[in-house]
C-alpha cells in the first residue's frame, strides 16, 4: 500500500510551452501533497504544499503564477510549469501524506523535465 | 524543524553493517527523527522513524540516544542496492507537515 505515481516520468519541451505533471496517490487518500524540485547533485527543495480543495502554499522564492498547482481531489494533484525556460529543467518530485494513521510521507518516482 | 548534521559521504563493504550517524542537537520534545533514502534518479523512499525509543523494521534499525541529540541508522547487511543518499530529518509528526531535506549522506556500498 501507499503508492504514489507521477506522470509523465520524463518530458522534453520547447522553451515557452507549458507542461503539466500529475501526482496520484493510488491506494490511499491524501489530504496533503507536496511538490519538490531537485537540481543535479543537490538536495530536494520544497516548492509548495497543497491541500485538497484549497489554494497551495508556496515557499519563498517560488513563483505561484509560473508553477500552478491544483489539488482537485484526495488522490490527484497537478503541477503546471507555465512558459517553461531552460532554467526550469529539473527533477520534480511529489509526495503525499495519508488522511489518517501513519504520518510518514510517500514519494512519487519523480518527473525529469528538460526544457530546450 | 530542527536542523540535522550528517557526514557527506561514507563507504561500506557489501555484507557488512552500515552505520549512518545524524546529529540533531536542537531537537524539540515533540519532533520525530525520520530517515529517507534516495537512489539515483528516483523519489525518496521512507525507511524508518522514531521519537525516543529504538526502532527496527525489515529495512533498518534506528538507535536514538537517550538525550535525543543524535541517532544512528543501521543497515545490518548492506548490499550494492543500498547505495543511495540517506537523509535524516526531524519534524513534528503531524502528517501535514513538510519534510526539510538537508545534504544527506551519500553511502557507497562496495563489493
Image (tube, rainbow, N blue to C red):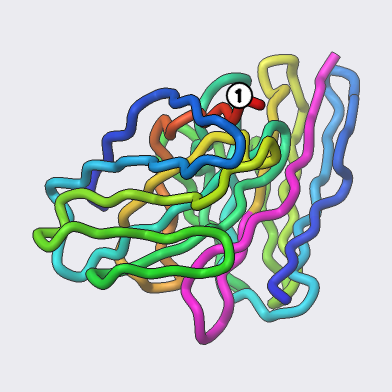
Q: Is residue B29 above or below residue B86?
A: below
Question: Percent position (x, y) of residue A67?
Answer: 65, 40
Is residue B43 one of those drawn in magenta?
A: no
Residue ranking furthest to the left: B67
Question: Which residue: 62% across, 57% down?
Answer: A95
Q: Secondary structure at mark 1?
A: loop
In magenta stretch: residue A98:
yes
Q: Nearer the viewer, residue A90 or A72?
A: A90
The front one of A39 and B74 is: B74
Residue B74: x percent and y percent?
42, 51
**Residue interval drawn in magenta:** A95-116
Residue located beneath label 1 in the image: A39
Q: Residue at x 50, y 67 (%)?
A: A104
Q: Which quadrant of the figure has residue B21?
A: top left
Q: Quadrant of residue B92?
A: bottom left
Chain bearing tag 1 is A
Query: At 38% across and 46% down in the image, what residue appears?
Result: B88
Q: Residue furthest front?
A: B15
Q: Could you tell whether B97 is left or right of A87 in the image?
A: left
Q: Quadrant of the C terminus of chain A?
A: top right
Amino acid at each position: 500500500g501507499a503508492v504514489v505515481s507521477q506522470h509523465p516520468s520524463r518530458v522534453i519541451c520547447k522553451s515557452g510551452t507549458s507542461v503539466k505533471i500529475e501526482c496520484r496517490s493510488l491506494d490511499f487518500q491524501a489530504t496533503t501533497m507536496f511538490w519538490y524540485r531537485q537540481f543535479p547533485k543537490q538536495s530536494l527543495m520544497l516548492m509548495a504544499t497543497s491541500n485538497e480543495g484549497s489554494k497551495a502554499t508556496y515557499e519563498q522564492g517560488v513563483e505561484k503564477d509560473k508553477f500552478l498547482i491544483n489539488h482537485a481531489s484526495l488522490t490527484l494533484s497537478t503541477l503546471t510549469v507555465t512558459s517553461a525556460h531552460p532554467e526550469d529543467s529539473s527533477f520534480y518530485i511529489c509526495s503525499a501524506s495519508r488522511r489518517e494513521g501513519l504520518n510518514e510521507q510517500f514519494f512519487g518516482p519523480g518527473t525529469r523535465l528538460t526544457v530546450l | 524543524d530542527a536542523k540535522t548534521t550528517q557526514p557527506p559521504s561514507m563507504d561500506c563493504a557489501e555484507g557488512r553493517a552500515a552505520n549512518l550517524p545524524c546529529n540533531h542537537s536542537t531537537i524539540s520534545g515533540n519532533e520525530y527523527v525520520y530517515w529517507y533514502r534516495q537512489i539515483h534518479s528516483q523519489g525518496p523512499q521512507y525507511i524508518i522513524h522514531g521519537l525516543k525509543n529504538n526502532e527496527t523494521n525489515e529495512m533498518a534499525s534506528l538507535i536514538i540516544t537517550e538525550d535525543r541529540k543524535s541517532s544512528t541508522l543501521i543497515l545490518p547487511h548492506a548490499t550494492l542496492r543500498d547505495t543511495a543518499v540517506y537523509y535524516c530529518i526531524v519534524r513534528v509528526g503531524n502528517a501535514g507537515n513538510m519534510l526539510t531535506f538537508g545534504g544527506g549522506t551519500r553511502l557507497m556500498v562496495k563489493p
